[in-house]
Image (spheres, rainbow, N blue to C red):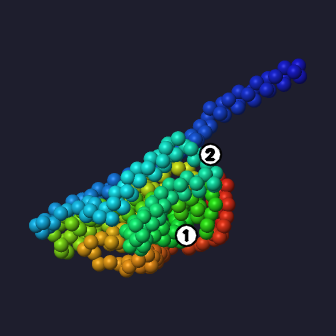
Amino acid sequence: ASLRIAGRNALAQHMLNAIASLLSSPPPPPPQPVSKLPPFEQLYIFAALIAGLLLLLAAQRPPPKGTVARWLPAPGEKRVYETWVLWYSIVWMGAFGVIIALELYEEFTAATYFLVCGGLAAPLVLRELARGGADGRPLGERHGARAQLWIAIFGFIGNYWYTHYFYCVLRARYTVPAWRLNDVPICMYLATHFYFSSYHVFANLALRRVATGFAPGNLRTALFAYVVCALSYATAFMETLTISHFPYYDFEDRHMAYTLGSAFYGIYFLVSFPVYYALDEPGNTPLEGTGLRGVALSSLGAGMLVLLLLDLTRLAAAGAPLTIGGKLWEVTPKGLAGSA
């Protein structure tokens, strides 16, 4: 009898549990993966940029007779250098595309990142060093060497200082296995060199086309300034978009990274694009002086101006405290950010 009673009790409890499960609310669905695509608002931003560009283009007057509208420089050393950078851009972009598409980075160590990024940066520098000894001309008289020094200094400042603004304002982080200088992976110092070499030559093409394709005056100056602003934002946005599927560089708020972050990063280029364009450009007042020393001072000055603009933007738009906690040398494994 006791067994029958126990069996009935167990059956009753099972039925009660079944009824309770039917009446209870269904379990919440699993969280949706966070989209890495840009927000829809970006369409409005770029539509506005294109509309403003079309209005300014419509207001331009043709250049004086005999003026040749150019994308590339006139035949000479600067043209040779910019053409070389354009061709080499295909090489490093193709290499990065293969690494990302095949997820080869999953097997990378700190040494691998250093060798890959250093190996892609080296041809740009070595070419100018090799050419410098070919005919005995000093490096300071060669546009390629001057351009490479300008980019190297500006890129180093950007990594050493500006990266911490992304850490603090946008809550960005690198989690690649890395050797770090001031909590920035050293491979990023190297990657920035070939990234920025290409970005600045691409910008030169558009700025030169504006400077040579329309009549001088306030309208052309306004168009030139507008193109600098539009290129700065577009360059920053496209870099954020193209590395969005690389899992070891991430943001706490990807929506803010695409919108505010692109404007924040674009401050770099608001300064660097016009200053770099003027480097050895015919018809422009030289900003860099002569020799390599003048180029170094020009790049250092541009770097300081960007730092001031970033900090003013941080205070005005975000109000986030700036904390720099990096070390002179640090090694971090995959999945961990540095000490900052």
Q: Nearer the viewer, residue 144 or 129?
A: 129
25 versus 37 height, above or below: above
13 versus 83 height, above or below: above
In the image, residue 42 lies at what x, y percent?
37, 55
Q: Nearer the viewer, residue 181 or 59?
A: 181
Q: Under tag 2, what secondary structure? A: helix
Q: Residue at x 62, y 45 (%)?
A: 107
In the image, residue 282 lies at what x, y percent?
27, 72
Q: Nearer the viewer, residue 64 or 314?
A: 64
Residue under label 1, please give it.
Answer: 160
Q: Which kind of residue does numbered mark 1 sit on?
A: Tyr
Whether residue 250 sits left or right of residue 74 in the image: it is: right
Q: Under tag 1, what secondary structure? A: helix
Around disc 1, counting alpha carbons within 10 Å, would you say few (fewer than 14), some (14 to 19), or many (20 or more)? some
Give the Cα separation between the discs numbered 1 and 2: 26 Å
The quadrant of the rendering that contains the C terminus is bottom right
Query: CB of mark 1 within 8 Å of CB of mark 2?
Result: no
In the image, residue 3 lies at what x, y percent?
87, 21
In the image, residue 246 lies at what x, y percent?
53, 50
Confirm whether residue 313 shows in the render. no
Whether residue 277 sits left or right of residue 304 in the image: it is: left
Label at residue 107? 2
Quadrant in the rendering for residue 167:
bottom right
The quadrant of the rendering that contains the N terminus is top right
Quadrant in the rendering for residue 338:
bottom right
Whether residue 320 sits left or right of residue 291 in the image: it is: right
Q: Residue at x 63, y 58 (%)?
A: 178
**Nearest to N terminus: mark 1 or mark 2:** 2
Label at residue 314? none
Residue occupying the far front of the picture: 135
Q: Which kind of residue does numbered mark 2 sit on?
A: Glu
